[in-house]
Amino acid sequence: MTSADYDLGYMEAVAELLQNYLLSDEIYWKMTSNSPPGEPGFPSLTLGTLLLSQQRVASRNLTTLQNNRKLSLLNKIEEIRMKWLTAWRSKAKEEFRSRLHLWGNYLEDLRQDPQGNADRYAYEVSRRVMLQLLLGEAEGIPEAELQMLRGLDGIIEGLMSPGEFVWDKDLAAGFPAQEYPYLYSQLRE
């Protein structure tokens, strides 16, 4: 998993591009900013990835400097969000649809070959977390997509059993089991 500085760096890079991104037709916007040394490259700019970064940062114990940086970035992002709220909600709705299908594809792979795909779960489950975060931002998600999400959650329940938090333990406080049960799962024996 990545560090707080990684997520803060991502949020900083996003804040510079966010208005142009919201006004574009793109759901996945390529990032050209450099991530902190020793960390993976930044993923594409999407609202889901931004919301996940914000949630991870909120989960961590930050230094005073990091916390001040976080607060400044959150204010800047919220300003842009409110200015372009209709575009924000529309983008969230489109990304929800895209992430839903990607999550469904992974779960189908997991169902077909549990042992061969279980090692990807900790990475792939980030899509399910993003779906949860996007639900709170999108407007007018079709009922069929919400039913599909419930069906996919049923697949997880059938394949997985309760387990340890699948990400770094320092993030667990920001992702409680009641709200994110799929992060506390392991493949059934």
Image (cartoon, grey):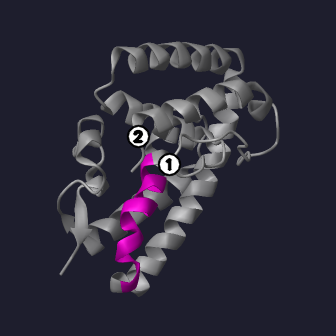
Q: Position of residue 22 (x, y in %)?
A: 74, 31
Q: Quadrant of residue 79?
A: top right
Residue, disc 1: 39
Specify the amino acid type for callout 2.
Answer: Ser
| Residue at x 70% of width, y 28% of height | 18
Q: Residues within 10 Å of mark 2 (few under 14, many from 20)?
A: few
The quadrant in which the C terminus is found is bottom left
Q: Secondary structure at mark 2?
A: loop
The residue that appears at 63% across and 42% down in the rendered structure is 46
Image position of 30 with respect to 77: above or below: below
User: Residue 163, position in %: x, y?
Assistant: 17, 61
Q: Nearer the viewer, residue 187 or 151?
A: 187
Residues in magenta, as a range? 116-129
Dominant secondary-structure state across the stretch colored magenta: helix
Residue 127 belongs to magenta span: yes
The residue carrying mark 2 is: 3
The residue depicted at 46 percent of the width and 20 percent of the height is 70
Among numbered discs 1 and 2, the one appearing first in the sequence = 2
Q: Quadrant of residue 86?
A: top right
Relative side of 110 to 43, left or right: left
Question: Is disc 1 in contact with disc 2, using a CB cutoff of under 8 Å?
Answer: yes
Whether residue 54 sits left or right of residue 75 in the image: it is left
Q: CA distance from mark 1 to mark 2?
A: 8 Å
Q: Of the residues shown, which amino acid type is indicated by label 1?
A: Glu
